[in-house]
Each structure stands twice: as C-alpha cells, then as structure tokens.
Image (cartoon, grey):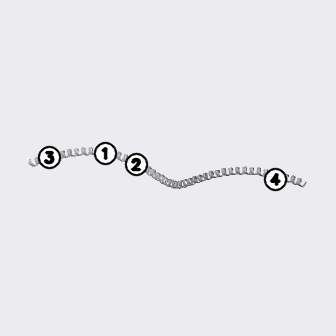
C-alpha cells in the first residue's frame, strides 16, 4: 500500500509536473510569441526612429537654411529701411526745394507781369514820344522853312535898303 500511495503520489506529482511543464511551455510559447512581437515592434520603432531622426536632420538643415535666409532678409530689411529713410529725407528736401522753387516761380511771374506792364507803358510812351517827335520835327521843318523865307525876305529887304541907300547916296 505504501507503494500504491507512493505510486499515486508519484503519478499525481508527475501529472502535476507535466501539467506545470505544459503550462510553462505554453507560457514560454506565449512569451516567445510576445518576444517576437516585441522584437517586431522594436524593429518597427527603430525604423520609425531612424525615419524621424532623418526627418529631424532634414528639418534642422532646412531650419538652418531658413535662419540664414531670415538673417539675410533681416539685413536686407535694415538696408532697405536705411535706404527708405534716406529716400524719405531726400523727398522732404525735394519738397522743400519744390516749395521754394514754386515761391520763386510765383515771384518771377509777378516780376514778369510787372515788367510786361512797364514795357507796355514804356512802348506806349515811346510811341507817343515818337509821334510828338514827328510833330515837333514837322514844326521844326516848317519853322526852318519859315526862317529861311524870313531870312530871304530880310536879305531882300536889306538888298533893297542898300540899293535905296546907294540910290540916295548916289543921287
């Protein structure tokens, strides 16, 4: 009986150990499967990590280029702002010059109107003076003719008086 019990315990122990071994084997198969899945996931994660790292590197490279372009653009903006300031100052200067030129132009136009009026007045006076000179010249010519006539008359009278005086003296 001791052998029977021993045999029963042994069979039961063996069954329990077989059951435990089978369950451990199933657990190992499950762990094996989980390990394979974990390895696949790890490989996929590594692949994704490599892809992300490559993209990050490309983005960083693009970022460097963009920062360079931004720096150049900022420098260009500063340069253009300075140029704009200079152009603004030049424009203000030109506006002041234009205003002064407009004032001078108005002054010149006023002077031209005054000088034109004075010229017309002078031309009118010159025409009047010319007509007066012509009238006076005619009067001078007439008076010279009258003077010549009177001198001729006086000479004729002198000649006649001398002839009369000669006649009286002679006779």
Q: In the image as oriented, which residue stretches furthest toward the left?
A: 170
Residue 159, horizontal then vertical, whole percent: 14, 46
Q: Name which of mark 2 and mark 3 comes first in the sequence.
A: 2
Q: CA distance from mark 3 to mark 4?
A: 197 Å
> Mark 2 or mark 1: which is in front?
2
> Mark 2 or mark 3: which is in front?
2
Q: CA distance from mark 2 to mark 1?
A: 26 Å
Q: Which mark is residue 112?
A: 2
Q: CA distance from mark 2 to mark 3?
A: 66 Å
> Mark 2 or mark 4: which is in front?
4
Front-most of 79 and 17? 17
Front-most of 22 and 75? 22
Q: Name which of mark 3 and mark 4 comes first in the sequence.
A: 4
Q: Which mark is residue 17?
A: 4
Q: Quadrant of residue 64?
A: bottom right
Q: CA distance from mark 1 to mark 4?
A: 157 Å
Q: Name which of mark 3 and mark 1 comes first in the sequence.
A: 1
Q: Which residue occupies 71% across, 51% down? A: 35
> Mark 1 or mark 4: which is in front?
4
Q: Secondary structure at mark 4?
A: helix
Residue 134, horizontal then vertical, whole percent: 28, 44
* Residue denoted by label 3: 159
Instruction: Answer whether labels 3 and 1 touch (C-beta < 8 Å).
Output: no
Q: Secondary structure at mark 2?
A: helix
Q: Secondary structure at mark 3?
A: helix
Front-most of 63 and 75? 63
Q: CA distance from mark 2 to mark 4?
A: 132 Å
Which quarter of the rendered picture does the N terminus lie within?
A: bottom right
């Amino acid at each position: 009986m001791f052998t029977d019990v021993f045999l029963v315990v042994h069979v039961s122990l063996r069954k329990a150990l077989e059951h435990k071994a089978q369950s451990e084997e199933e657990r190992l198969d499950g762990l094996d499967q989980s390990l394979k899945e974990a390895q696949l996931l790890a490989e996929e994660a590594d692949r994704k990590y490599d892809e992300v790292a490559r993209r990050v590197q490309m983005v960083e490279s693009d970022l460097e280029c963009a920062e360079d372009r931004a720096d150049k653009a900022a420098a260009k903006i500063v340069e253009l702002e300075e140029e704009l300031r200079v152009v603004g100052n030049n424009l203000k200067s030109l506006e002041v010059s234009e205003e002064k030129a407009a004032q001078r132009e108005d002054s010149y136009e006023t002077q031209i109107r005054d000088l034109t009026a004075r010229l017309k007045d002078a031309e009118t006076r010159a025409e009047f003076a010319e007509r007066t000179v012509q009238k006076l010249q005619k009067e001078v010519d007439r008076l010279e003719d009258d003077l010549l006539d009177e001198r001729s008359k006086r000479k004729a009278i002198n000649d006649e008086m001398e002839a009369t005086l000669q006649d009286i003296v002679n006779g």
